[in-house]
Image (cartoon, coloured by chain):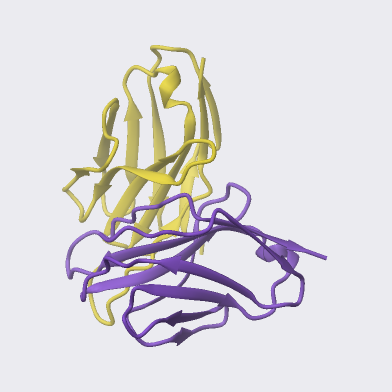
């Protein structure tokens, strides 16, 4: 059982380049999330998807777009990377429906992105 | 969601109990207390959560005060592998909505020999 899988694990981009971070979960979870974590800080929510076909902004959405491709996959796109987007990006998922209510979130291992 | 306050760092000797406090004085009646930990920049890992009763699982115990304004996460026999940043998060559980988590800076627990 892989849980939440993120690709790539590491990436270096030049300013202005674009890229897509991929995330997939195999737990049949309804909700998926993208967070970023800067050095010495807690995680901050970028975007989330409460169900297939829906996406919503989190705390820090500027400079990012997301796609909930299907129930399993939730991608994060940087259209024009900036040095301020250098961070570790975490994808997460949670069930959020059904009984007993289970809102435990499972996280991937992160993508370490450097923008130079 | 209610804000939480945690000490920035704590030390604990291996084999001893680690007691990590969290203040959440503005918690609402429908908000739960969650604990996650993050080991060396890995993805956060769920530990435990509770509403008002004390909870225990294979990883830890959660003690919530009667007025629910504070809680304590207890790792009964800390090991070196418990060295991590521990996050206390307070949030409501709403049926059918996403479980967004608001992370603070947490408590860095250092377990030593």
Tell me if residue A28 can be seen: no
Task: Examine the rendered structure and indicate whether residue A78 appears above or below residue B6.
Answer: above
Describe residue B106's horizontal placement relative to residue B18 as left or right. left
In this orientation, which residue lies closer to the viewer: B40 or A27?
A: B40
Task: Examine the rendered structure and indicate whether residue A21 appears above or below residue A48.
Answer: above
Q: Residue at x 72, y 77 (%)?
A: B16
In this orientation, which residue lies closer to the viewer: A70 or B3?
A: B3
Residue A16 position within the rendered picture, expressed as x and y whole percent measured from the top left: 38, 12
Task: Examine the rendered structure and indicate whether residue B65 appears above or below residue A71.
Answer: below
Name the tint of chain B in the rendering: purple
- Residue A45 appears in which quarter of the rendering? top left
Residue A47 position within the rendered picture, expressed as x and y whole percent measured from the top left: 27, 42
Residue A53 position within the rendered picture, expressed as x and y whole percent measured from the top left: 16, 48
Residue B20 position within the rendered picture, expressed as x and y whole percent measured from the top left: 55, 69
Task: Examine the rendered structure and indicate whether residue B51 appears above or below residue B24.
Answer: below
Describe residue B23's horizontal placement relative to residue A113 as left or right. left
Name the tint of chain A in the rendering: yellow
In this orientation, which residue lies closer to the viewer: A11 or B23?
A: B23
Q: Residue at x 73, y 70 (%)?
A: B79
Q: Residue at x 38, y 62 (%)?
A: B89
- Residue A12 appears in which quarter of the rendering? top right
Numbered circles on residues, count: 0
Tell me if residue B70 can be seen: yes
């Amino acid at each position: 059982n892989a849980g939440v899988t993120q690709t790539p694990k590491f990436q270096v981009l030049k300013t202005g380049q674009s890229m897509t971070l991929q995330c997939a979960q195999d737990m049949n979870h309804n909700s998926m999330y993208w967070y970023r974590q800067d050095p010495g800080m807690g995680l901050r929510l970028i975007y989330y998807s409460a169900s297939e076909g829906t996406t919503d902004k989190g705390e820090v959405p500027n400079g990012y777009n997301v796609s909930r491709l299907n129930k399993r996959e939730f991608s994060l796109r940087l259209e024009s990377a900036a040095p301020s987007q250098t961070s570790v990006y975490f994808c997460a998922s949670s069930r959020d429906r059904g009984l007993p209510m289970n809102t435990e979130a499972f996280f991937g291992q992160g993508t370490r992105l450097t923008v130079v | 969601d209610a804000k939480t306050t945690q000490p920035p760092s704590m030390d604990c000797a291996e084999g001893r109990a680690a007691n990590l406090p969290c203040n959440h004085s503005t918690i609402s009646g429908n908000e739960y207390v969650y604990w996650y930990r993050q080991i060396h920049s890995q993805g956060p890992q769920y530990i435990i959560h509770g509403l008002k009763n004390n909870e225990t699982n294979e990883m830890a115990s959660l003690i919530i005060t009667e007025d629910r304004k504070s809680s304590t996460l207890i790792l009964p026999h800390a090991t070196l592998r418990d060295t991590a940043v521990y996050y206390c998060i307070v949030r409501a559980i709403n049926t059918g909505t996403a479980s967004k988590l608001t992370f603070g800076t947490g408590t860095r627990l250092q377990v030593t020999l």
